[in-house]
Image (cartoon, rainbow, N blue to C red):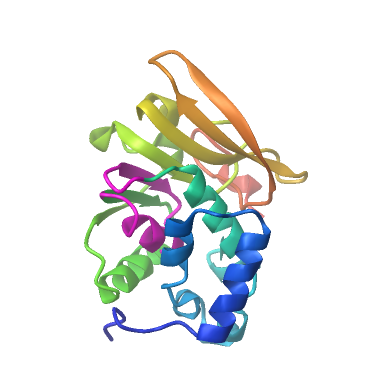
Amino acid sequence: MHLKNVQPNAIRMRRMLEAVMAQGVTDQKVLTVLGSIPRELFVSKALATDAYDDACLPIGELQTISMPSVVARMTAALELAGTEKVLEIGTGCGYQTILLSKLCRRVYTVERHKSLSEAAVKRLHDFGITNFTPLVGDGTLGWPAQAPFDRIIVTAAGPWVPAPLIDQLAVGGILVIPVGPQETSQKLLKIRKISATETTEENLGPVAFVPLVGQQGLPQTNRA
């Protein structure tokens, strides 16, 4: 099934975008692209009626599709102009990936669950998206062979910012990542790389994400 011309439910989408803007997202490019993506196609049929709620929903493998407002906030924080090479850690269902693909030059996306990666790749191809490259692996290690990246976005939370991601970020680049223990409120960080040895950090507010599992994150046994 080719999904390129599938249109989202207009009424539900309008309500979703109103909820996103109510959370402070004003980037018109992000809002326009977000409004073009039929979110119900990224969740199971049983959850289709909930797809436009500003809520995270399960997608399998104990992972979730993030709240639309959080997806929009993180994407806007990347300050995409359309020419960037972006690394995404956590492909998930591909919802964030398709948004990025419409706003940057190319997305390199890493997912540790093969089943999720394969399903997302098929979904992206069905949407006619071609400017992405997938990898099944440990996202906490980044993607050294493809570095440096102009932007990096991480869609899971670990106890710290993985050093490989800072190393693989180009000077002048931006990393957006949730950080914090799973049992308490996490914070969304926007990190800008000023030089090879210097970064700045901005706290964009509280969030709640699934665990970032890997060598530079949480161990597999902490998954819950």
Examine the rendered structure and indicate whether residue 161 appears above or below residue 220: above
- Which residue is found at the position 49% from the left and 20% from the top? 199
Q: Residue sitting at 67 percent across and 40 percent down?
A: 187
Q: Position of residue 63 (x, y in %)?
A: 56, 61
Most extreme residue toward the top, as rendered?
197
Q: Is residue 190 visible?
A: yes
Q: Looking at this view, is 171 or 140 the one in front?
A: 171
* Foreground of the two, 113 or 97: 97
Residue 216 is inside the magenta segment: no
* Residue at 49% across, 49% down: 76
Image quadrant in which you'd find residue 145: top left
Q: Is residue 31 above or below residue 74?
A: below
The relative height of residue 21 versus residue 57 in the rendered view (above or below) is above
The one nearer the camera, 79 or 118, is 79
Residue furthest to the right: 184
Q: Is residue 86 magenta?
A: yes
Vertical relation: 32 (above or below) 211 = below
Residue 217 on image: x %, y %: 55, 37
Question: Residue at left 34%, top 73%?
Answer: 123
The percent position of residue 185, horizontal first and vertical second, equals 75, 44
Please tell me how many numbered marks the rendered image carries.
0
- In the image, is 74 to the left or to the right of 80? right
Quadrant into which the N terminus falls: bottom left
Q: Is residue 52 in sight in this rendering?
A: no
In which quadrant of the rendered image does the C terminus lie? bottom right
Q: Quadrant of residue 178?
A: top right
Q: Position of residue 14 (x, y in %)?
A: 57, 77
Identify the magenta region. Answer: 81-105
